[in-house]
Amino acid sequence: MNYQHLCLQVCARAKETGAFIREEAKKFKTSTIEVKGHNNFVSYVDKTSEQKLVTALAALLPEAGFIAEEGTSDKKGERYNWIVDPLDGTTNFIHGFPCYAISIALTEGDKTVLGVIYEINQNECFYAWKDSDAFLNGNKITVSATPTLKDSLLGTGFPYYDYGKMNQYMELFKHFMQHSHGLRRPGSAATDLAYLACGRFDGFYEYSLAPWDVAAGAFLVQRAGGKVADFSGGDNYIFGKEIVAGNALVFHELQETVKRFMI
């Protein structure tokens, strides 16, 4: 398998689909929104984008299955599976807030071997493949060299439907407000992780996330020199609905702090 060639093809398909989303954003009407659950929205743009991606990815690797947010394909691959979010940051999109992305990962068995995140409004394509460096629009990227948590800028997400850990989350939020350079919540976990991979954030944490939110981004962070875990420090961050990630210097302190408040 030539993962580099495949990755660059995936980047091209993500950009094509991103162009469709960008055009639809100019004429999108909120009357087309569907509600999947409390604060959980979907539109024809999500569904059409996913169909475009599933069709394109199936052509690139016919034997692969899919884990896709909108359920466009239920095919399961014996060896390879694509994990796809056609529009991460749907709430941002429907409100015209310009931060949303396409996220695509490829797994071989239980290992991620390719990750692409295309931030549509900034026209920024982040990508990496098995054993490669991480890249942004053709240029190598690495995580930051910020040495301490107190000097870090952190990304996170606010719970929008699962409020079971709200009290712990708010206590942790308060702690980081007082013991870091600050926190940001752009509203797209894929974008947050891509920004961590290129050094804009020094750390990131969130709970109640789905595999398609984090699979590509976690891989990018690792290929850029960072570390990723679940809140307990284990490796169940793709399917375990919780993730903490950081540059190699602050990761341990970040993970231990999140664990202390959230476990």
Image (cartoon, rainbow, N blue to C red):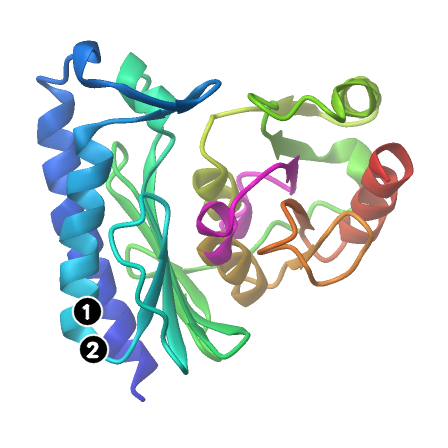
Which kind of residue does numbered mark 2 sit on?
Pro
Contact? badges 2 and 1 (CB < 8 Å): yes
Question: In the image, residue 152 lies at what x, y percent?
Answer: 71, 35
Q: Locate residue 116: give its quadrant.
A: bottom left
Residue 204 within the segment the image draws in magenta: yes
Of the pair 27 and 120, the residue shown nearer to us: 27
Could you tell me how far apart the alpha carbons at marks 2 and 1 are, in whole angstroms? 5 Å
Kindly identify the residue that appears in the image at 50 percent across and 79 percent down: 109
Question: In the image, residue 202 lies at what x, y percent?
Answer: 64, 42
Which residue is situated farthest in the right direction here? 260
Q: Locate residue 42: give its quadrant.
A: top left
Bin the neighbour count of mark 2 within 10 Å (Cα to Cα): few under 14, some 14-19, many 20 and up. few
Quarter that holds the C terminus? top right
| Residue 18 appears in the picture as rendered | no
Which kind of residue does numbered mark 1 sit on?
Ala
Of the pair 101 and 106, the residue shown nearer to us: 106
Question: In the image, residue 108 lies at what x, y percent?
Answer: 45, 78
As drawn, is 38 to the left or to the right of 168? left
Note whether 222 is above or below 259 in the view shown: below
Q: Which residue is mark 1?
A: 58
Q: Which residues are magenta?
A: 196-215
Which residue is situated farthest in the bottom direction here? 1
Note whether 54 is above or below 214 in the view shown: below
The numbered disc on residue 62 is 2
As drawn, is 40 to the left or to the right of 252? left
Of the pair 188 and 127, the residue shown nearer to us: 188
Question: In the image, residue 77 lies at what x, y percent?
Answer: 36, 76
| Residue 222 appears in the picture as rendered | yes
Kindly identify the residue that appears in the image at 55 percent across and 24 percent down: 185
